Image (spheres, rainbow, N blue to C red):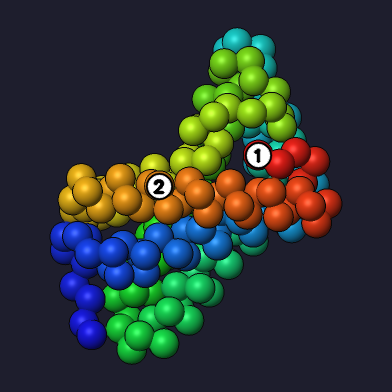
Amino acid sequence: MALDFKPIDGLYEGLVAIIPAMFANATPVVARGRRPIDGGLRFLDGRRLLGDGKTWEGLIAGLAAGVTVALLLAIALDNILVAYVGTLTSIGAMAGDITASFIKRRLGIERGAPAPLLDQLNFYIGAIAVLLIAGYTITPTMFITLAVISGLAHITANILAYKLKLKNVPW
């Protein structure tokens, strides 16, 4: 089955596009990085730009995982476009996660403290934003459907990571 991805209006296309982003988002927790992306810099409000939770090791591991999954999907589906779309969503997922940390710091929310919806959907919003910037379209129904699936997958992955002692909090 050929995937043209313009617009992303079917569940199959949507899942193939977003699965690499899910892997990109989930991987940094196992990277256990030590070098913060913000290098300890503070914003105008005196708070850290991102905090210690966003590291270069996590960013690189997340991107590597997302791109690897995108390539494996492209091979399995015999469609090189899947690798391109999956790479875009992986980049977007990491950008969305970093943006959410920036927002949380501005709101005075400490690392590890919950921010409902922002914590669950930051990677998804980032992934979709990058697709839109690249000229892809997504129907409103598919946007909502994939948001629900992504949010539930994120919650499930975080609970599992918490139980495996990879995370200090289950969100």
The residue tagged 2 is 148
State the image coordinates of residue 127 (x, y, percent, origin top left): 39, 51
Q: Residue furthest top?
A: 45
State the SS at label 1. loop
Find disc 1 in the rendering and name its residue.
171
* Vertical side of 54 occupied by 70: above or below: below
Q: Is residue 75 rendered to the left or right of residue 157?
A: left
Residue 56 visible in the displayed image:
no
What residue lies at 63% left-to-right and 15% top-to-bottom?
108
Circle 1 residues within 10 Å: few <14, some 14–19, many ≥20 = some
Q: Considering only vertical position in the picture, is 145 above or below 170?
A: below
Q: Residues within 10 Å of mark 2 (few under 14, many from 20)?
A: some
Residue at screen point 71% across, 32% down = 112
Q: Amino acid at mark 2?
A: Val
Three-letter amino acid code of the residue under disc 1: Trp
Is 62 situated left or right of 73 in this image? Answer: right
Q: Secondary structure at mark 2?
A: helix
Compare residues 49 and 27 and report the one nearer the observer.
Answer: 27
Q: Position of residue 58 (x, y in %)?
A: 67, 53
